[in-house]
Every structure is written in C-alpha cells, then in structure tokens.
Image: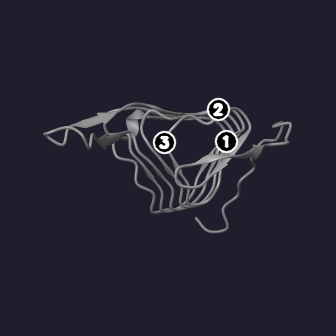
C-alpha cells in the first residue's frame, strides 16, 4: 500500500510482521532485518544509507538495520543506518532513532530518548487483517 522498498532482496522479514502504508524501507546497499511480530506504523522510514556531513565529497556512510521480535514502531518514525532495535522496543510517533534501543525500552523524540520501560510479557502474535487491500 504505497510502501517503497528499493532493492527488496536486501529485506528479511519474519512471521506476523506488518509494514503499514506509505513507508520507505531503504535496502539499497545494506540489509534491513525485521524479525517476528513487528509493527511498523504508516509514514515511517528506515534508512541504511546517509551522507557524512564532515566529508569533503559528501561521502556515503551506512550499515544494516536490525529490528528484533515484538518491536513496535509508531507512525512517522525515522530509523537511521546502523541501528538495532532490541526485543520489545517501542518507538513513539515521529521520533528519530539514531542509536540502538534496548530490550523493552520505550523511546520518543528527536533524537529518540528513553521514556520508560515496557511492561509486557511479549507473548502475543500479531493477527493483522487489513480493512482494505
């Protein structure tokens, strides 16, 4: 649903995971790994490439993005290269994630910062049934 995944062969996605509408998953040079029961909200962007602002030639830098089981990425989130979202992490709407997020941490803001810890056993399976295809 209007989601763009350039070079989708660098995308690994697990069971029961959702990528909502109008997302961008950048897999041009590096891999994006999305494990099981992950929910990525609409209008979110996951980048594996960026530019080094200190480089004289506007050089690229990048790396894989890894999203572990039961991660919830709310609407409009930006995840930058080389980030790992550990099991059960939650990222608040419109946040910018530039560094790793720990297990069951709830982060929000620009840059994303720890708000509190998630109190959830993470035993659920996402059973998504879209209203419209």
In the picture, measured across the screen, residue 120 lies left or right of residue 80, that is right
Residues under numbered marks 1 and 2 in contact, where contact means CB atoms less than 8 Å apart: yes
Horizontal and vertical percent for residue 74?
63, 56
Residue 71's label in the rendered image is: 1
Determine the residue positioned at 62% across, 46% down.
Answer: 113
Snapshot quadrant of residue 37: top right
Q: Categorize mark 2 by other alpha carbons within 10 Å: few (<14), some (14-19), many (20+).
A: some
- Which residue lies under the disc numbered 3? 98
Q: Which residue appears farthest toward the left when viewing the image?
A: 57
Q: CA distance from mark 3 to mark 2?
A: 14 Å
User: What residue is rendered at 44% in x and 32% in y?
Assistant: 82
Quadrant the C terminus occupies:
bottom right
Marks 1 and 2, how far apart at CA = 7 Å
Badge nearest the viewer, 3 or 1 = 3
Please state which of residues 133 and 10 is positioned toward the viewer in this rendering: 10
- Badge 2 is on which residue? 86
Percent position (x, y) of residue 40? 59, 51
């Amino acid at each position: 649903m209007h989601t763009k995944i350039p070079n989708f062969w660098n995308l690994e996605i697990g069971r029961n995971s959702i990528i909502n509408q109008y997302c961008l998953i950048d897999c041009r040079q590096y891999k994006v790994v999305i494990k099981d029961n992950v929910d990525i909200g609409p209008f979110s962007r996951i980048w594996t490439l960026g530019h080094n602002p200190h480089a004289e030639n506007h050089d690229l830098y990048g790396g894989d993005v890894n999203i572990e089981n039961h991660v919830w990425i709310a609407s409009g989130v930006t995840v930058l290269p080389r980030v790992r979202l550990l099991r059960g992490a939650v990222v608040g709407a419109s946040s910018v994630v530039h560094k790793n997020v720990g297990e069951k941490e709830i982060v929000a803001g620009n840059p994303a910062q720890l708000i509190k810890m998630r109190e959830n056993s993470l035993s659920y399976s996402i059973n998504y049934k879209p209203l419209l295809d």
